[in-house]
Image (spheres, helix red, strand yellow):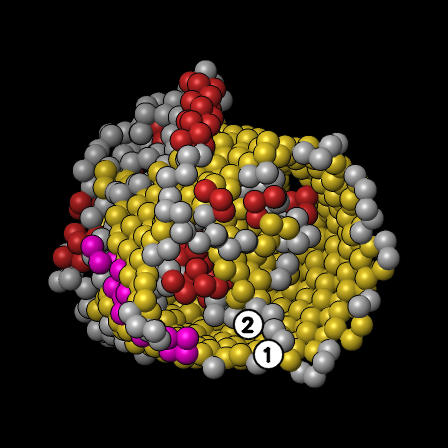
Amino acid sequence: MHKKLLASQLALVMGSTLAGFSAPLYAQDSAVLEEVIVTARKRTESLQDVPLSISAFNSEFMDKADINSLPDIADFTPGFDFAQGFGRQDFRPAIRGQSNIQGGANAGLFVDGFFIGDGGATLPLTALERVEVVKGPQGALYGRSTLAGAVNYVLKRPGDEFAGEAKLTAGEDGELRGDVTLSGPLGEAAGFMLSASYYEYDGQYDNGFAGNEVGAPANTDDVGGEETTSIVGLITLNPTDGFDATASIMWEDSDDDPYAIGLLESSNNNCFFGPAPNPPPGTPADGLVGSAYNGSGYFCGEIDTDDILDANGGRTNLELGFYDDMGTEFEALRLGLTLGWNFENGRLQSKTSYHDYETEARQDQTFGGGDYYIVDAPFPPFVFAQRFGFLTETLEDSSEWSQELTWSSEIDGPLSYLVGAYYYEYESSADERSSSNASQAATAPDYSEFPLVADADFDLNNWAVYGQLIYAMSDTLNLGLELRYSEDEIELTGGANDLDLSESFDAVLPRFTIDWAASDDTLIYGVISRGNKPGNFNSSNSIREDQRPVDEETAWNYELGAKNTLWDGAATLNAAVYYIDWEDQQLTTTTVGADGSGSFSILDNIGESEIWGAELEFNANITDWWELYLGYAYTDTEIDEYIIPAAGSIGSSGAVNAYEEPAQHGFPYLANGDVLISGTELPQVSKHQATFSNTFSGQLTDNWDWFARVDYLYRSERYAQVYNAADTGDSNRVNLRAGVGTQLFDIEVWVRNATDDDTSPALIRYVQAVDGFLTFGPDRAIGATLPEQRAAGVTLTARF
C-alpha cells in the first residue's frame, strides 16, 4: 500500500513542479535551447517528441562538462549508476536500480546502433556527435542485453566544409590527453571523419607490498595507471538520393595497471552475530550448526577508505611481481557498415558489424589482505607452501558479428511502421592461470611457470524478428506497439572437464506506448514494456551438472512521464515515475563442489525484486550568460525474495557452507531449510542521485569570450551486498572549470573532485586469507575500490 501511495505522491509532485515552472521566470533575452535529435526508436526524432525516458548529450555539452568516459556520462544521467569496481574492463552499468554482481551486464552499449559486447568502458568519446541513454527495457527494438536500458554512442558525421579540432590536456598524476579530429567532404558525394586519441594516467596510489615468506618480491610501483591509444575513422557516401552508405572503423589499444583497490581486513569488523540458528528438523541441513563465519564477524556501516590505506602506511598492498606485466591489456577492432536504399514508400537498411577483442588480465585478487598461507608439516624438515588462489591471469580472445535488415515506411497518413530481422554471433575462448594451480611451493621467480588451464569455450547465437507500429488516433494522440521475438542458443564446450553443454532460450518482448500532446509544448506519455536477460551457464569446473544452467530473467516496466518545453524554448523540464517488477533474478549464491568439498560462487535464478522510482531533468538558459542543469533520481529498490538453498550448500561430506551466513544476519529459514532474504535494498545502487550544474559565460572583448562552470554531483550510499551491512557512505563531489577563448582557440583550467571526497565508488563482500598451522580459514572482509582524488589541470583547444 505504501508503494502505491508513494507513486501517487510522486506523480502529484511532478504535476505541481510542471505547473510551477510554467511561469516565465527567466530573462527575456535568454537564448532558445538547441533542439536535441535522437534515434532511440530507430527513426530520427526530436527528444521532446519521443514517449520514452531519454538523457541525451551532444559533443558541446560533453566538452563543457569534461565528460571523458561512461562513468562521467552516468554522473549526468538521472537513474544511471556506473560504479567500476575492478578497473576499466569492469562493465556493470545499473540503470533504474537493476544492478548485477556477476554475469552479463543488465544494460547494453551500442555504437551507431551496433551492439558492443566487450570493452565498452574504454571507448573514446572525442569522435562522438552525441550520446543517448534510453531507460527502461529496450528489448523490443535493441534486443538482448537491454533488460534495464541502452546506451547508444553516435559517431560524428562530416559536414559540407573541412573542419578540424585539436585538444591537449595535461593534469596532475601524470594525466595527458591528446585528441585530433578532422572531417570534411571527399568530392561531391562523399565525406570523411578521422579521430585519433592518446590518453595516459599514472594513477594516484602508491603500492607497498613488502614481500612474504613464500618468496614474492617487495614492490612499490603505482597502481591505477591507465593508457589508451585509439583511432576512429568514418566514410559516408551519398551518390544519389536513393542510396547512401556509412563505413566505420574503430581501433583501440589499452594497457592499464592493476586497479586501485584495498581490503578492509576482518580485524575491523564491528558486528558479531554468533552461530546461526539450527535449521528446521528433517531438512538437508538438519543437525548442522554453522559458526559465525570463522568467528570474524562482519563490518556494518560506512567504509572509510582512509582506514584501509592507513593500515598499510597510506598505500595499497597488492602483489605486483607475481606475474609479468601485471594489470590489463586490451585491444579491440570494430568494423561497421550501414547501407540504405530510399524508395517512394519506404527505406530499406542493412547494418553489418564485426568486432574482434584480445584481453590479457593479471591481478592480485586478494586485494592486499594476505595472499598466501604456510602449512608446516608436524615432522620437520617437511614444509609445504601453497599459494592462496586469488592471483590470477586470464588470456581471452573473443569476437562478434551481427547483421540487421530493416524496412521502415515513408507513407503519409496515420500509420507508420518498421519491420526488422537480426542475427548476432559471439565466440569466446580463454586460458587461465592461478596461483593455486601448482602443487609445488610457489617460489619466485618461477610463478609464470604455473600451468595455464583452458576454460570452456563459450558460443552464442541470437536471431530475432521485430516490428513497430505507430498509429496517430488524432493530431494530438498516438499509440505505439513494438514487438520482438528472439531465440538464443548458447554452448559451453571443452575446458578442464571437457564440457559439452547447450541450451536454447526464446523470448517475446513487447512495448506499448501512448503519448498525448496536451499543448504545443507539453507531451504526456505512458509506457508498458518487458525486458529479459537471456540464460547462461556456470562454468566452474567442480560444481554439479544440475547447477550449470541459469534461466533467463525478466522485468516488466510501467512508466508515466511528461516532457515540457518552457519559457518560449529557453528551458525543458522532463520527468517520469516508474515501477519495475523483476523476476527470476540472476543472483550469486555459494555452493560446494560435486564431491562435497570446496566453495564456489555461482549464478542462480533465486531472486525477485521490485523497484519504484522518479526522475527529473531541467535544462534552462536562465539569462544569456547563465545556463542551468538539474538532474535528480529517486530509486527505491526492494528484494522481495532471495533464496539461499541449503541443499546446494551441503556436500556429501556433511560440510556446512555459506547458506548459514544470512541466518546469522537474522533472515529466517523456510520449511525446507532454505534461507529467505527479503526487505533489503539491491546492492551497488544509490537511492538518491542529484546533479546540479551552473555555467556562466560572457564576452571579454570583441574577440575573446569567457566561461566558468560548477558541477555538484551527489550520490547516496551504496550497499556492498544484499544483507545491507557495509555501505560506501554518501558521495559529494564538486568539479570546477573555467576558461577563455576565441572562435579558433580555447584555454581552460579545471579541478576534478575539488572537495577531495574519499567515498569508495564500489564495495564487494569478500574474504581474507590468513596464515595457519595445518589449517586455512577465510575471514569476512570488504574489498573497496579507491576513489579518484582531487586533481587539477589545463586543457588547450584549437579549431581550424
- Name which residue lies at 31% across and 29% down: 665
- Name which residue lies at 45% across and 42% down: 567
Residue type at mark 2: give it. Answer: Ala
Which is more toward the observer, 678 or 711?
711
For marks 1 and 2, give the CA distance: 31 Å
- Name which residue lies at 78% across and 45% down: 417
- Judge from the rendering whether residue 391 lies leftward or rightward of residue 545; answer left or right: left
- Rendered location of residue 573, percent (x, y): 46, 40
Q: For residue 736, what is the image quadrant?
A: bottom left
Q: Which residue is mark 1?
A: 161
- Rendered location of residue 148, percent (x, y): 54, 43
Q: Which residue is mark 2?
A: 332
The answer to if 537 sits in the magenta stretch is: no
Count of picture labels: 2
Q: Which residues are magenta?
A: 736-755
User: Element under label 2?
Assistant: strand
Q: Is residue 401 visible?
A: yes
Tell me if residue 733 comes above or below residue 686 in the rendering.
Answer: below
Residue type at mark 1: give it. Answer: Glu
